[in-house]
Image: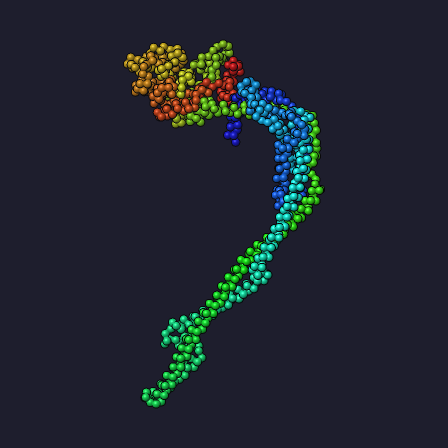
Amino acid sequence: MFDEVIQLREYVHILKKRRWIILTVTFLTVVAITIWTFRQIPIYEATTRILIEKESPNLIAFEEVLKLDTSAQDYYQTQYMILMSRSLAKEVLKKLGLTDLQRPQVQMFFSVRGIFNELAEKLGLSTPAPSPESDETIDKEERLVNEFLQSITVSPIRGSRLVDIKAISTDRQQAAMLANTLADVYIERNLDDKLVASKDAVLWLEKEVEITQKKVADSEAALQQYKEEHGILSFEERQNIIMQKLLELNTAVNEAKIKRAAIEAQYKQVQKYQSDKVESLSVVINNPLIQGLKVELANLESELSQLRKKFRDKHPNMTALQSQIDATKSRLNTEIKRIFDSLKSDYEVALAQEKDLSKMLEEQKHEAMDLNKKAIRYGELQREVESNHRVYNELLQRTKETNVTERLQTNNIRIVDHAVVPNSPIAPKKIRNILLAMVVGLTMGIGLAFFFEFWDNSIKTSDDIKQYLDMPFLGFIPKVYGKEYSNNGNNGTRAKPDMIVAIDPKSSASEAYRTLRTNVVFSLVSDEERALDLDFGSVMLVTSPGPAEGKSCIVANLGIAMAQSGSKTLIIDCDLRKPVMHKIFNVNNDRGFADMMADIKTYGTKVVVKHTKIKNLDVIPCGKIPPNPSELLGSSLARIVIEALAERYDKILIDSPPVNTVTDPILLSRIADGIVFIVHAGQTKRDVAQRARDQLLSADAVILGGVINSVDLKKDSYYYYYSYYHSHYYTQDGKKQLNAAA
């Protein structure tokens, strides 16, 4: 929720900042549209209201006659299109005898493109498009029809069958006349079309009745001929007989298959066994005669066994009994053979019976299929006869109905309200156009405001420092105008921006430098050192991405602020190409840092260090500008000298050239404990600052944070972010100071 409020405040801030763009665009839009509106010719509108009932289905209702889609939606859409048809428009114009229309040649409601095109034409910046009247290739009648259709609007009233026919014209009399005449001609044509449709339908129906009657006769003759050719009296009865016979044969075949399978199983079983094992088969064992012979044979063999105990084998009794046994065995074998022969005969008979029945079944199936084919053709002929009869009866009935309705024809469209001559114009709507112009102007103005705001890629706020440069924000320095008045109220005392901390210590700029001093010092000291209240000497490099960003001014005032806090401070002017520190502090520049680097024995630190009028503040100017600044600043001697000076001073500030112009700041960054990165408010571009930051980071430099210089507190855009530092808070006579600055 808090983030949303912050974002809303940012939007409001953008609108306030770019308010003149919004107001200018809105004003110009309102003026342009107001002029355009008052130049328009009044436009009048007349309305005729008609009632369109759905087409009656009694005239020609079935779709087979005229193939009409009688759905309500399609019907009404068709009527609306007829009202706007060119043929109907020509009839209206012919009836009125019009050769010209008082039709408005301008838009009823404004469009931004139309207005600016018209203004461009008036100013001679563009050539107007040729009007329809000037185009000789367009037929005059067609042009008149086009103008008429552009003047007409058909508006159905939702939830009803009422339709409004609206006509516009610069002539109020003509507007009413056009609407009423269009309704009259439309109603007349609708009735004429229905009468013509009825006559055409009657003729068409009578012709179709004759054709269908012939089709009925032809189809009946074809059906009768087919029945005679195939000797068919009744297909249904014959089909029932054939199906019954087919069912009976199918049952007989199944029974024959079962019987044959049983006999075949017994027969094959007998064939499989050897002769000495045949007697064990069920078909043999279950035979009563064989069972009796077996009993008789068993008794004879038992008796023979008893006689062997008394007689020899050749004894007459033994011989006679053996003969009886042999005869019984012979009878048994004969009976078994007879059973085999009987099984074989039964199998062959069953197989033959099955084949005969199967053949009869197949023949019956073929007969049934043939009958089905004939039945299909018979059904086709019969259905054709029935269909022709239905169509014939329907056509005959509709012919009679059409003849009746033709004589009783009525119109389903009528006028509910005639158009009256309008008293007041409908356009231009002056108040609405002006209000819309304000809305459009505000929208365009706000759009342009945000466009310019987001197109501006310069660094302006602390959020830009954090978001785009990914470094802490150390503070801002307000812009110092031509006159800044000190707290003593002496009018006309001009403060020097390079030394404003010393000249006007109670100004908002001075307070900003003191705040920057505090933030820089705290960023150099670790939490452990801060807890122990230690104050170590610190070497700070002050640089910026490009020239003219106020870097040297900040070095001077920051040095003064540190000196005023009691820290022994040294400023070293290492901008060996464009030095300015000697000018700011008004010191001699005959010997300086460059001379010391070139000849350390001759120019020691005692020689080059200059005392200023500010207590605790010394300066080492540049000295003679060397031909090789980078070699001097990158030497080991520069590091040794600055480290030696750090032991004598609490704070050392190094003023260096811009990062993106020379390599000097990269070389000095290896000596400094931290870097103060300066950007100019609204001037330094993000990509330029990012490129400078990346160069410093590539050299493993420690960037303490960013400072935004030359912030204009009188602008709403900066007052929104930095209002805390406004001079009202820091000066007893802040109101006077602000007014004087303005």
Residue 230 place in picture, x, y as percent: 56, 60
Q: Residue at x 56, y 23 (%)?
A: 130
From this viewpoint, which residue is outermost toward the right?
A: 408
Q: Quadrant of residue 672?
A: top left
The one of 443 and 510 positioned closer to us in this rendering: 443
Q: Is residue 416 above or below residue 646?
A: below
Q: Say if 212 sits above or below 171 in the image.
A: below
Q: Colour scheme in the image?
A: rainbow
Along the viewing direction, whichever of 51 and 506 lies nearer the viewer? 51
| Image coords of residue 542 (percent x, y) | 39, 19
**Image position, residue 351 (x, y; %):** 45, 69
The answer to whether residue 444 shows anywhere in this view is yes
The residue closer to the viewer here, 194 or 177, is 194
Res. 426 in view: no
| Relative side of 122 to 604, left or right | right
Q: Quadrant of residue 379?
A: bottom right
- Residue 277: x %, y % from top left: 37, 75
Residue at the spot 49% in from the left edge and 63% down from the top edge? 362
Q: How many discs appear?
A: 0
Is 169 placed above or below 225 here?
above
Above or below, 407 against 518 in this view is below
Q: Nearer the viewer, residue 277 or 499?
A: 277
